[in-house]
């Protein structure tokens, strides 16, 4: 890899699986220290471990991005851990537990999806 992010700190939300995990691994391979954030602990802790196993620096932080206070605390924790924050990949998002046409979703499901996917970013 080119070391494009050597000395930088990257925050990856939704880093416990899928695109978030792949992005966290790529930032680490490019030299970044990575803060992995997710509401789900197991997958995110595994992502951080995978990065450390490859010789990179990574920490997991549990955060519900639908709660503004948790996002503020997340950023503060990243700053405390690494002393800086250079970039963020705001990847976290949900599809909602309800299946079917959107106009048939219960309002509570709609509200949760909108809150996480829009407010969380």
Image: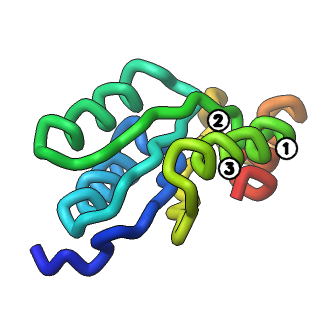
Query: Taking 106 as reference, is 80 left or right?
Result: left
> Residue at left 53%, top 40%?
37
Query: Taking 69 as reference, is 64 left or right?
Result: left
**Disc 1 versus disc 2: nearer the observer:** 1
Earlier sequence position, callout 1 versus callout 2: 1
Indicate which disc residue 75 carries. Answer: 3
Earlier sequence position, callout 2 versus callout 3: 3
| Secondary-structure class at tag 1 | helix
Which residue is label 2 attached to? 96
| Secondary-structure class at tag 3 | helix
Quadrant assignment for the N terminus: bottom left
Residue 59, image quadrant:
top left
**Residue 118 point in image, percent of width and height:** 76, 57
Asked whether disc 3 touches disc 1, contact meaning CB atoms under 8 Å apart, the reply is no
Asked whether disc 1 touches disc 2, contact meaning CB atoms under 8 Å apart, the reply is no
| Secondary-structure class at tag 2 | loop
> Residue at left 40%, top 68%?
8
Q: Residues within 10 Å of mark 3 (few under 14, many from 20)?
A: some
**Residue 4 point in image, percent of width and height:** 26, 80
**Disc 3 versus disc 1: nearer the observer:** 3
**Residue 114 point in image, percent of width and height:** 79, 49
Which residue is label 1 attached to? 68
> Residue at left 89%, top 34%?
107
Residue 111 visible to the viewer: no
* Spatial CA span between label 2 and label 3: 26 Å
Earlier sequence position, callout 3 versus callout 1: 1
Residue 55 visible to the viewer: yes
The one nearer the camera, 108 or 45, is 45
Indicate which disc residue 22 carries. Answer: none
**Disc 2 versus disc 3: nearer the observer:** 3
Q: Residues within 10 Å of mark 2 (few under 14, many from 20)?
A: some
Residue furthest to the right in view is: 107
């Amino acid at each position: 890899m080119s070391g494009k992010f050597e000395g930088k700190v990257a925050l990856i939300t939704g880093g416990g699986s899928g695109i978030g995990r792949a992005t966290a691994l790529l930032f680490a391979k490019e030299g970044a220290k990575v803060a992995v954030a997710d509401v789900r602990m197991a997958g995110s802790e595994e992502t951080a471990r995978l990065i450390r196993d490859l010789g990179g620096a990574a920490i997991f932080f549990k955060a519900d991005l639908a709660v503004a206070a948790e996002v503020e605390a997340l950023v503060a924790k990243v700053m405390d851990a690494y002393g800086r924050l250079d970039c963020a990949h705001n990847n976290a998002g949900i599809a909602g537990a309800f299946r079917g046409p959107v106009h048939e979703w219960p309002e509570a499901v709609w509200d949760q999806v909108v809150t996480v996917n829009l407010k969380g970013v």
